[in-house]
Image: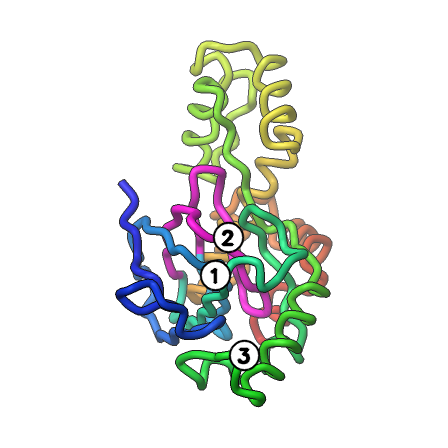
Amino acid sequence: MSHKCHSILRDRKGRLLAQVASVSADLPSGHSIPEHFHPEDQLIFASQGVMTVSTAQGIWVVPPLRAVWIPARTPHSVRTSGSVFMRTLYLLPGLVHSLPARCSVIHVSPLLKELILHACTFSRLNRRIPAHRRIMEILADQLQAASAVPLQLPSPTDPRALRVSRALLADPAAQSPLQRLSHGCGASKRTIQRVFLEETKMTFREWRQQLRLLHALKLLAAGEKVTAVALDAGYSSPSAFISMFKRQLGSTPNRYFGN
């Protein structure tokens, strides 16, 4: 059951206090924030560590230099991997028009990073204050220009495909062929392939690879070595894992987390 948070932009009588508000928190590895939702749009950024945001639609993994956009009233929970320096902005719905009406991970440019960190030095930003208005305008421009990053793992809704996805989420390194997984869930291999493509917009193979990448990101953030992560994520060798990681995120794991 989701627990609603009271508006951070309004007082108890519902009067608007500001258009943007911020919350900063330094969280230990393995910290969980139970499912809840906000009446505001939300941007969650971590300058260190990895966050996993879960909704009914899927899982979004947020490494450094990425942020997750959570539209207003979207029930979600958060779990940290590694020590996380979390910086959150709450925005009045409609303030940023171009971002989607669903969760998404976006790339955080150096300028956007500094804007988020600067905005978080204010508890609230009100457009009636000229200095605040300038920050909000540049922030909105940068968010509208930000590119989405494919770091989500959509969840199928078909009960048979859902059982397959849950089995793999419990053991991302499992090498069980789809034929066996499908049989155990009461469906044919072809049916599961069709359902995954229809409901997640990914082939089953792409979905499984994405699961392993997101699992690896969490392990790397927690300080695990690349060789151990490669095996734990189901790759045959560290080189195969590094090649996949570079193809997906444009950098080797060590360089990515070193930065």
Q: Is residue 221 visible?
A: yes
Relative image position of residue 17 (x, y in whole percent) = 40, 74
Q: Which residue is mark 2?
A: 71
Q: Is residue 100 left or right of residue 56?
A: right
- The front one of 179 and 157 is 157
Relative image position of residue 177 (x, y in whole percent) = 55, 23
Q: State the mark number for residue 127.
A: 3
Circle 2 sits in a helix, a strand or a loop, which is it?
loop
Circle 3 sits in a helix, a strand or a loop, which is it?
loop
Q: How many numbered marks are there?
A: 3
Q: Residues within 10 Å of mark 2 (few under 14, many from 20)?
A: many
Q: Amino acid at mark 2?
A: Pro
The correct choice, above or below, for 141 with respect to 249 in the image is below
Q: Residues within 10 Å of mark 3 (few under 14, many from 20)?
A: some
Provide the residue span drawn in magenta.
Answer: 52-80
The correct choice, above or below, for 140 with respect to 175 in the image is below
Report the magenta stretch's main SS.
Answer: strand
Q: Which residue is mark 1?
A: 42
